Amino acid sequence: MSASVEELLSAADSGDGRGRSLARSASNEGRVYAILLAILVASFLLAIEFIVPARVLWQLIAITAFYSIGVLGLTLWYVRNRKASGLGWSKRYSRALALTMAFYAVGIAIGTNNELSSPAFWLPYAALTAAPLVIAAIRQGAK
């Protein structure tokens, strides 16, 4: 039962094509996940800064529930659909998520200062908060 050279080369060629397809799919899924997660975190930060200070309990509950369901749903989608990860993705994603959450935490702390309530400050800050994950996603697509 020895395979011919042609059969072995054909099998290797077929595997190479499937590997490239799998890597491309992993890259796209990771990129979409990171960008959507960045948008959710930045949106939650803006919601906390602009809606929650009104101290309306049902709004706080609704915003938190929407954010939680969004993150949970997005993570479940990613875990179920992910077949592989691109080289270095896990490390880039972990670092980017840590930076995004650090910016988020600093933003929450800054938000306690009522003098900084202008959208001119918070919109760019929300973009800065999302930036590490977005940059990781862009770098993922470039690999």
Image: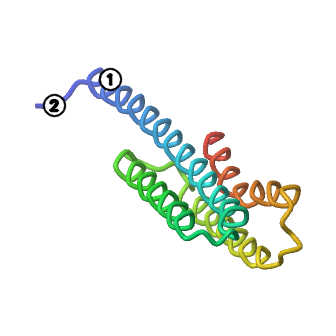
Q: Which mark is on residue 2?
A: 2
Q: Residue at x 59, y 55 (%)?
A: 40
- Select label 2 or label 1 by which is in front: 1
Q: Position of residue 101 (x, y in %)?
A: 64, 69
The three-letter code of the residue at mark 1 reads Ser
Relative to the observer, which residue lies in front, 1 or 91?
91
Element type at mark 1: helix
User: Is 10 in front, or is 141?
Assistant: 141
Residue 132 position, x and y percent, is 70, 58
Within 10 Å of disc 1 (Cα), the crowding (few <14, some 14-19, many 20+) is few
Secondary structure found at label 2: loop
Which residue is the site of mark 1?
A: 10
Which one is nearer the viewer's eye here, 115 or 104? Answer: 115
Q: Which residue: 83% across, 56% down? A: 119
Asked where in the image residue 9 lies, by quadrant, the reply is top left
- Residue, far left: 1
**Residue 48 location, quadrant:** bottom right
